[in-house]
C-alpha cells in the first residue's frame, strides 16, 4: 500500500475564469507535517488555490503533486484530504455522530471500527457529550470543533481549512488558534490554512505564503515576512508601517515627498531606484529633545502633532526632520511623562529597521 | 502499513483510509452537466420530435405541397376560425387585465385578511380542472342557468350564451385570470409604495398619482401577464370545444375535430402549425420588446423581483398625461378618495371569481338531469352514480397514470435541475432550462395532436403508456422548476464537504442533496401529480375507447349529455382540497409549536 507522507507540490498552477486569472503561475512546496498558511486579501487567489487542492475546481494548467502523483484532475472524493469549511458545512439533517461516521461509511469501515474512531475524534476535540445533537443545536465554537473532528476522523494526511475561525468572536478565536495548532502537532498532519487574518497566520504557522493578485508576494516564516518584507505590499499588509514615498535619492541621503530628509551617514548605501521606504511605528521611539541617541541608534528632531491613547500603547503622530510626518508607537512607561501635542522632541531608530524598496526590474 | 515516521501518529487501527488512502489518478470527468441528459433526451424525443413530425405532416399529407394551408386559408369558415381565435384570446386577455388588476393590487398591498381571501378565490379555481370550471359555466350561462333566471326575473328574455362566443369569452377570461394576477401581483409587491406618497406630496391626487406613477411601474407585470394569457388563450381547447359550439369554435377545437371526427391529419397538422407559429410570434415579439427570457415568462410568480422595469418614457408619454388629467377629474370629484372603494371592488370581483365554484354544490344534489338552477327537487342519485364502475374505473386509471408520471417526472426533473444548477457550463444550463420549460409554454393542444400522430404509429394511442409518456413531458417543467429553485438556495458547501469526505456524486445526491431539498422535491411531486391527474387535452386526444382517464370521462359526460355527476366530482375535489389545506395548516401549527418547545 502506498504511503501518504503528506508532501504537496504545486507546479506552475494557473487558474482562469474566463478572462480573469485567479491564480497565476503558482509554484510552491509544502513539507510533510507543516502548518502552512495562505494569507492574503480577498480576491488574492488563496481560496481558489485551496479549492484546487481539495479538488472542487481544476486548474487550467499545471500540476499538483501529492506524494509523487499528479492529482490536479482527481475527483475530490478520491483525494483523502480533510477539509474544514468556512461555514463548517455540517450536514444539518444528521446528528454529530452521523456527520462523523459519514466519511468512515464512505470508506466501508465496519460499524465497530467506525464507532471507535468517531469516539476518539470526539475525544480529541473534547466534544463527546454532544454526539447526539444536531448541528442547529450547537454553538459556533462547538460547530467549529465538530467540523474539525469530521475532517480528521478518517485520518487524512492533509487538513485544509478555509477561514475556519472567521465567524467566531475574538476571544474564542484566540483560544481556538491555540487548540488548532496543538491538535495539528499532536496528529502530525500537514495543514494548509487559508485566512485573511494576519494574527492567525502569525500565531499558528510554520510558514506563510502571502498572496496578492493570484501569485505569491513572499513566502517564509512569520518572522521573515515581518522583519524582512520583500516588497512594499508585504510591508504594508503585515502589521502597521509608515510607508514613505521617495522624492529623490542622493549618494547618502533620501528626500521624501513628506519633506523629510533622511541622512544615512554612509551607514547604508542608497540603491538606485529606491521608491518606497518603510519603517514600523514600534521601531521608532520618542526621547526628550536634546538627549543623546543610544549606541547604534540614529536620531533627529521632531514635533508631536497628534496623540492617540490606545490602552496598551500610545500612537503619536510627529513631524520629523528625517521622515516628515510619521506615526510612532510607544509602550507606556510609568517613570516617563508622556509627550504632549506640540512638544518638541527627539526621535530615535536603528538603521536596520528602515526598509528600502526598489522598483522591480522591468516593472 | 500506513503509519509514517515523521508524525506522531494517533493510535489508529493502523488502517488509514483503506484502499482509498491513495488518490487514483483519474480525471474529474463526469460533472453534473451529464445528469440533465435523460430529461433533455426525454423532452426531445417525446415532445419535440412529435411536433416536428406534425409540422412535416402539414406539408406532406396526403402529398407534398401546400394544399393543407391552401384549404385552411381559402375556406372562409377556417379563416374566420383563425381570426376568432385571435379575437377571443385578445379580448379575454383584456378582460382578465381589467378584472385582475384591482385584485392583484389588493393581493400585493391589501390587509392580511384581504390578501388571504383573494388568494383563496384565485387559487381555488386555478387548482380546479378546466373541465369542472367549464361545467360551472354551463350551469351559470345555460338556457335555464343562473344568469337567465336573473334576467327572467327582471322581465328580460332568455339569452343564448352557451355555444356562442359569449360563453367562450366569459369562461376563458375566468380561466386566464390567475395567469394574469400572479405576475401582476409579483411585480406590484416589488413596487415601492413610497413613490406614490412622493407623488401625492408633490400635489397629485390619488387617482392621478396612480395613473402617472404606479401604473407605469407595474408595466413588466402587465406585459408578462398579458403575453401569458394571450398565449394560453390562443391554445385554448377544452373551453371552445365544450362551450363554443360551431359559432364559438377556436383553432384548438378545430384541430381536435379534424382528427377525431374526419381523420383529416393534414388539415389538423396545418391548423396546429398555424397555432404554434402564432404563439411563437407572440413570444418572440414580447421578448424583443421587454428583454425577458422564456423561463422568466413561464416562471410566473418569480417575475419582477430585482428586475428593473424598463419604463424610460412610458410614464411621460402623451397617453399617460391625458389619462392622468382625466384621473385628476376623479380626484376633484372625490371619488378616488373613498378609501374603501378599491378593497370593496377587489373583494367583489374575487367573490365573483369564486362563485362558479360554489354553484355546483346544489347542482350535485339535483333531482333531475337537466342543469336548472336552483334545482327542482333534491336527491343523492348522482352521488350513487359516481360510485359505479362507469366513474370509478376512470378514476383508478387517472390515479395510476398520475402516480407513474410523477415518479418519472420527479426523477428526470431533479436530475436536470442538478445539471443546470450545479453543472459547470452556464450556456448549456440555460439551453437546458429553456428546453425543460418548453412544454409549459408551448400550446398543449398542438403537442397533443403531435402525440396522437406519432404515438399512433407505435400503437400507443388509447393506452395508459401513451398517456403517461405524454404526461411526463408536461409534468417535467413543474418538477424541474420547483427543484431548481430549491437547489439554488442550497449551500453547495454541503456537497463539497461530502465530496471531501469521500462521497461520490451519486452518494452526494442520495445522502446529502435529496434529504436537504426534500421539501422542494415533494412540492414538485405534488405539482406533477396534480398536473397529470387534472390533464384533459392530451387525455382527450389519446384516450377514449379502451382507456379512459377521469378528465376524459368528464369530457364525454359534458359533450354527449348533461350530467350532474360532474358536479359531484367538483364537490369531491373541493372537499379534498379543503381537507388537504386543513391538514397543512394543522401540521404547520403543531410543527411550530414543537419547534418552539425544543
Image (cartoon, rainbow, N blue to C red):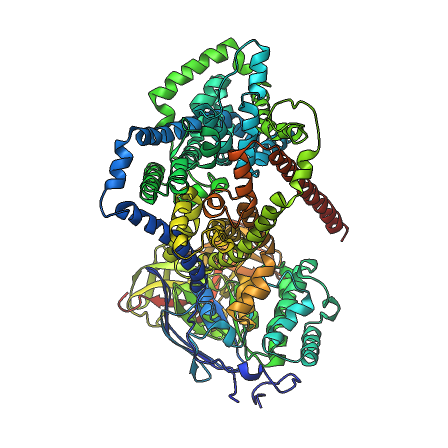
| Residue A321, visible in the rendered structure | no
Q: Quarter-wise, where is residue A128 in the image?
A: bottom right
Looking at the image, which residue sits at the far right?
B597
Q: How many marks?
A: 0
Q: Quadrant of the C terminus of chain A?
A: bottom left
Query: Residue at position x 48%, y 18% from top?
Result: B207
- B322 and B361: which one is in front? B361
Q: Position of residue B164 (x, y in %)?
A: 44, 24
Q: Position of residue B327 (x, y in %)?
A: 45, 15
Query: Residue at position x 25%, y 32% from top?
Result: B74
Up-down: is B451 above or below A265? above
Q: Position of residue A317 (x, y in %)?
A: 49, 53
| Residue B5, visible in the rendered structure | yes
Query: Residue at position x 48%, y 32% from top?
Result: B242
- Left or right: residue A254 versus residue A136 is left
Q: Position of residue B202 (x, y in %)?
A: 46, 19
- A62 and B313: which one is in front? B313
- Left or right: residue B258 versus residue B11 is left
- B272 and A316: which one is in front? B272
Up-down: is A29 above or below B389? below
- Left or right: residue A141 versus residue B293 is right
- B503 and A142: which one is in front? B503
Amino acid at each position: 500500500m502506498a504511503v501518504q507522507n503528506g508532501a504537496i507540490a504545486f507546479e506552475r498552477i494557473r487558474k482562469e475564469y474566463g478572462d480573469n486569472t485567479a491564480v497565476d503561475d503558482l509554484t510552491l512546496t509544502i513539507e510533510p507535517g507543516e502548518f502552512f498558511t495562505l494569507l492574503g486579501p480577498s480576491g488574492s487567489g488563496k481560496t481558489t488555490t485551496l479549492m484546487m487542492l481539495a479538488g472542487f475546481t481544476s486548474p487550467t494548467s499545471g500540476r499538483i503533486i501529492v506524494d509523487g502523483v499528479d492529482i490536479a484532475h482527481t475527483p475530490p472524493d478520491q483525494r483523502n484530504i480533510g477539509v474544514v469549511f468556512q461555514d463548517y458545512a455540517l450536514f444539518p439533517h444528521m446528528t454529530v455522530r452521523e456527520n462523523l461516521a459519514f466519511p468512515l461509511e464512505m470508506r466501508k469501515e465496519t460499524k465497530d471500527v467506525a464507532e471507535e474512531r468517531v469516539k476518539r475524534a470526539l475525544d480529541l476535540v473534547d466534544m463527546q457529550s454532544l454526539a447526539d445533537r444536531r448541528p442547529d443545536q450547537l454553538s459556533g465554537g462547538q460547530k467549529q470543533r465538530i467540523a474539525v473532528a469530521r475532517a480528521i476522523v478518517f485520518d487524512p494526511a492533509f487538513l485544509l481549512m478555509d477561514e475556519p475561525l472567521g465567524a467566531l468572536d475574538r476571544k474564542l478565536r484566540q483560544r481556538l488558534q491555540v487548540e488548532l495548532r496543538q491538535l495539528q502537532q499532536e496528529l502530525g498532519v500537514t495543514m494548509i490554512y487559508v485566512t485573511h487574518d494576519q494574527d492567525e497566520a502569525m500565531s499558528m504557522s510554520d510558514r506563510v505564503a502571502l498572496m496578492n493578485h493570484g501569485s505569491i508576494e513572499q513566502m517564509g516564516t512569520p518572522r521573515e515576512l515581518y522583519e524582512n518584507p520583500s516588497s512594499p505590499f508585504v510591508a504594508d499588509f503585515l502589521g502597521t508601517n509608515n510607508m514613505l514615498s521617495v522624492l529623490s535619492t542622493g549618494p547618502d541621503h533620501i528626500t521624501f515627498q513628506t519633506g523629510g530628509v533622511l541622512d544615512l551617514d554612509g551607514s547604508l548605501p542608497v540603491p538606485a531606484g529606491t521608491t518606497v521606504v518603510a519603517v514600523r511605528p514600534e521601531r521608532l521611539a520618542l526621547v526628550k529633545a536634546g538627549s543623546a541617541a543610544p549606541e547604534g541608534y540614529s536620531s533627529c528632531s521632531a514635533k508631536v502633532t497628534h496623540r492617540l491613547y490606545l490602552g496598551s500603547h500610545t500612537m503619536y503622530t510627529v513631524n520629523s526632520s528625517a521622515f516628515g510626518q510619521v506615526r510612532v508607537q510607544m509602550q507606556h512607561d510609568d517613570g516617563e511623562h508622556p509627550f504632549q501635542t506640540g512638544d518638541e522632541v527627539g526621535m530615535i531608530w536603528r538603521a536596520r529597521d528602515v526598509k528600502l524598496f526598489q522598483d522591480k526590474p522591468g516593472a | 502499513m500506513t503509519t509514517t515516521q515523521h508524525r506522531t501518529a494517533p493510535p489508529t487501527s493502523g488502517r488509514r483510509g483503506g484502499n482509498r488512502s491513495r488518490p487514483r489518478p483519474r480525471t474529474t470527468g463526469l460533472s453534473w452537466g451529464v445528469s440533465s441528459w435523460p430529461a433533455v433526451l426525454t423532452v426531445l424525443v417525446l415532445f419535440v420530435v412529435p411536433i416536428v413530425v406534425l409540422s412535416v405532416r402539414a406539408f406532406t399529407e396526403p402529398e407534398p405541397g401546400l394544399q393543407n394551408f391552401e384549404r385552411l386559408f381559402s375556406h372562409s369558415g377556417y379563416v374566420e376560425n383563425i381570426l376568432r381565435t385571435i379575437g377571443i384570446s385578445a379580448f379575454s386577455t383584456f378582460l382578465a387585465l381589467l378584472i385582475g388588476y384591482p385584485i392583484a393590487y389588493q393581493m400585493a398591498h391589501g390587509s392580511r385578511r384581504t390578501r388571504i381571501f383573494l388568494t383563496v378565490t384565485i387559487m381555488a379555481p386555478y387548482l380546479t380542472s378546466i373541465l369542472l370550471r367549464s361545467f360551472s359555466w354551463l350551469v351559470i350561462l345555460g338556457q335555464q342557468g343562473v344568469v337567465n333566471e336573473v334576467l327572467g326575473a327582471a322581465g328580460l328574455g332568455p339569452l343564448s350564451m352557451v355555444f356562442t362566443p359569449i360563453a367562450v369569452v366569459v369562461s376563458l377570461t375566468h380561466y386566464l385570470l390567475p395567469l394574469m394576477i400572479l405576475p401582476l401581483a409579483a411585480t406590484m409587491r416589488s413596487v415601492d409604495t413610497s413613490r406614490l406618497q412622493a407623488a401625492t406630496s408633490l400635489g397629485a391626487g390619488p387617482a392621478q398619482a396612480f395613473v402617472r406613477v404606479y401604473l407605469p411601474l407595474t408595466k413588466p407585470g402587465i406585459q408578462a401577464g398579458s403575453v401569458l394569457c394571450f398565449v394560453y388563450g390562443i391554445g385554448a381547447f377544452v373551453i371552445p370545444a365544450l362551450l363554443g359550439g360551431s359559432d364559438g369554435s377556436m383553432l384548438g377545437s378545430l384541430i381536435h375535430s379534424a382528427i377525431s371526427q374526419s381523420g383529416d391529419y393534414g388539415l389538423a397538422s396545418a391548423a396546429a402549425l398555424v397555432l404554434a407559429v402564432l404563439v411563437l410570434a407572440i413570444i418572440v415579439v414580447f421578448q424583443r420588446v421587454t428583454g425577458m427570457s422564456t423561463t422568466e415568462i413561464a416562471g410566473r410568480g418569480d417575475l419582477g423581483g430585482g428586475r428593473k422595469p424598463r419604463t424610460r418614457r412610458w410614464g411621460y408619454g402623451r397617453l399617460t398625461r391625458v389619462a392622468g388629467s382625466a384621473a385628476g377629474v376623479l380626484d376633484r370629484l372625490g371619488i378616488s378618495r373613498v378609501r374603501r372603494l378599491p378593497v370593496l371592488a377587489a373583494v367583489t370581483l374575487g367573490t365573483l371569481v369564486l362563485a362558479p365554484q360554489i354553484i355546483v354544490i346544489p347542482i350535485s344534489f339535483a333531482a333531475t338531469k337537466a342543469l336548472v338552477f336552483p334545482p327542482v327537487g333534491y336527491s343523492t342519485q348522482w352521488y350513487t352514480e359516481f360510485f359505479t364502475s362507469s366513474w370509478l374505473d376512470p378514476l383508478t386509471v387517472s390515479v395510476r397514470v398520475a402516480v407513474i408520471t410523477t415518479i418519472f417526472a420527479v426523477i428526470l426533473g431533479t436530475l436536470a435541475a442538478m445539471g443546470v444548477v450545479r453543472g459547470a457550463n452556464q450556456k448549456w444550463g440555460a439551453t437546458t432550462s429553456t428546453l425543460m420549460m418548453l412544454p409549459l409554454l408551448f400550446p398543449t393542444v398542438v403537442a397533443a395532436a403531435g402525440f396522437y400522430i406519432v404515438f399512433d404509429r407505435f400503437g400507443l394511442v388509447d393506452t395508459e403508456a401513451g398517456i403517461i409518456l405524454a404526461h411526463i413531458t408536461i409534468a417535467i417543467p413543474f418538477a424541474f422548476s420547483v427543484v431548481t429553485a430549491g437547489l439554488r438556495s442550497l449551500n453547495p458547501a454541503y456537497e463539497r464537504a461530502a465530496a471531501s469526505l469521500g462521497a461520490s456524486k451519486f452518494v452526494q445526491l442520495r445522502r446529502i442533496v435529496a434529504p436537504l431539498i426534500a421539501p422542494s422535491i415533494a412540492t414538485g411531486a405534488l405539482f406533477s401529480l396534480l398536473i397529470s391527474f387534472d390533464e384533459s387535452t392530451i387525455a382527450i386526444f389519446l384516450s377514449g375507447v379502451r382507456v379512459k382517464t377521469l378528465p376524459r370521462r368528464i369530457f364525454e359526460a359534458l359533450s354527449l349529455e348533461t350530467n350532474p355527476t360532474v358536479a359531484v366530482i367538483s364537490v369531491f375535489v373541493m372537499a379534498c382540497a379543503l381537507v388537504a389545506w386543513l391538514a397543512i395548516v394543522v401540521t404547520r401549527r403543531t410543527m411550530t409549536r414543537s419547534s418552539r418547545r425544543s
